[in-house]
């Protein structure tokens, strides 16, 4: 895993340009980039950055040992130099998950994370979800396939139907054709 913290003071460090290094990492299709774009002097950014910095210490070893994951934070003025960043951030701070060489972008606020409170725990949940081998899509597909047969009723509702005294046409049809015996 690669961790990059890029601000106005350190972006040219030891003869290396960290912005160019991040741009190269973003350009690789197989990489999963978790990017925090912040603005100096922004109150919400100042609250989010320390939580983002904790990721290095709390991520599980199976994620830390992967070469295809990059966790970076960059000043908004420097992110304009990123060629593989297709759209500018609408507000600050902006957290993005970028894959496919910069073609696939998901904002943290639009993710399926249950509690988006910008704490290290919610960031870890987001990274784990997006870094799974299936990309977080496998569970959704199997769930949809399972729900196709039997309609929109929940399993709890189906179990509550009394086939000795069904109420209404739908329950009668369910008892006659749908219920597994």
Image (cartoon, rainbow, N blue to C red):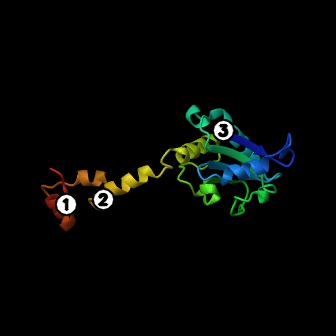
Q: Looking at the rendered structure, which numbered label has been put on residue 153?
A: 2
Q: Which quadrant of the view contains residue 14?
A: top right
User: Residue 1 or 171: which is nearer the viewer?
Assistant: 1
Name the residue: 64% across, 41% down: 120
Q: Tell whether label 3 touches label 2 (CB within 8 Å).
A: no
Name the residue: 61% across, 35% down: 64
Q: Secondary structure at mark 2?
A: loop
**In this picture, residue 137 sits left or right of residue 68:** left
Quick one: label 3 or label 1, which is nearer the N terminus? 3
Name the residue: 43% across, 50% down: 138
Q: Secondary structure at mark 1?
A: helix
Q: CA distance from mark 2 to mark 3?
A: 40 Å
Q: Secondary structure at mark 3?
A: helix
Q: Looking at the rendered structure, which numbered label has been put on residue 55?
A: 3
Quarter of the rendering occupied by the N terminus: top right
Extreme residue in the bottom direction: 169
Quick one: label 2 or label 1, which is nearer the N terminus? 2
Within 10 Å of the Cα at label 3, are there few (<14), some (14-19), or many (20+) other Cα atoms?
some
Within 10 Å of the Cα at label 2, are there few (<14), some (14-19), or many (20+) other Cα atoms?
few
Q: Tell whether label 1 touches label 2 (CB within 8 Å).
A: yes
**86 versus 2 height, above or below:** below
Residue at the disc numbered 1: 174
Quick one: label 2 or label 3, which is nearer the N terminus? 3
Counting from the top left corner in percent of width and height, residue 34 is at 65, 48
Q: Which quadrant of the view contains residue 106?
A: bottom right
């Amino acid at each position: 895993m690669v961790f990059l913290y890029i601000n106005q003071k350190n972006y040219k460090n030891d003869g290396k340009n960290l912005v160019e290094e991040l741009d190269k990492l973003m350009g690789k299709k197989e990489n999963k980039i978790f990017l925090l774009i912040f603005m100096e002097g922004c109150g919400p950014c100042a609250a989010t950055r320390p939580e983002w910095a904790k990721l290095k210490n709390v991520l599980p070893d199976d994620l830390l040992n992967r070469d295809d994951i990059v966790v970076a934070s960059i000043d908004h003025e420097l992110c304009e130099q990123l060629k593989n960043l297709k759209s500018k951030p609408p507000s600050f701070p902006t957290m993005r998950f970028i894959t496919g060489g910069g073609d696939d972008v998901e904002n943290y606020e639009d993710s399926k994370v249950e509690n988006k409170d910008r704490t290290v725990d919610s960031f870890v949940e987001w990274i784990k979800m997006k870094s799974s081998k299936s990309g977080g899509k496998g569970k959704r597909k199997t769930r949809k396939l399972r729900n196709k047969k039997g309609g929109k009723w929940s399993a709890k509702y189906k179990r509550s139907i009394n086939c000795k005294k069904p109420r209404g046409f739908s329950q009668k049809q369910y008892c006659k054709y749908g219920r597994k015996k």
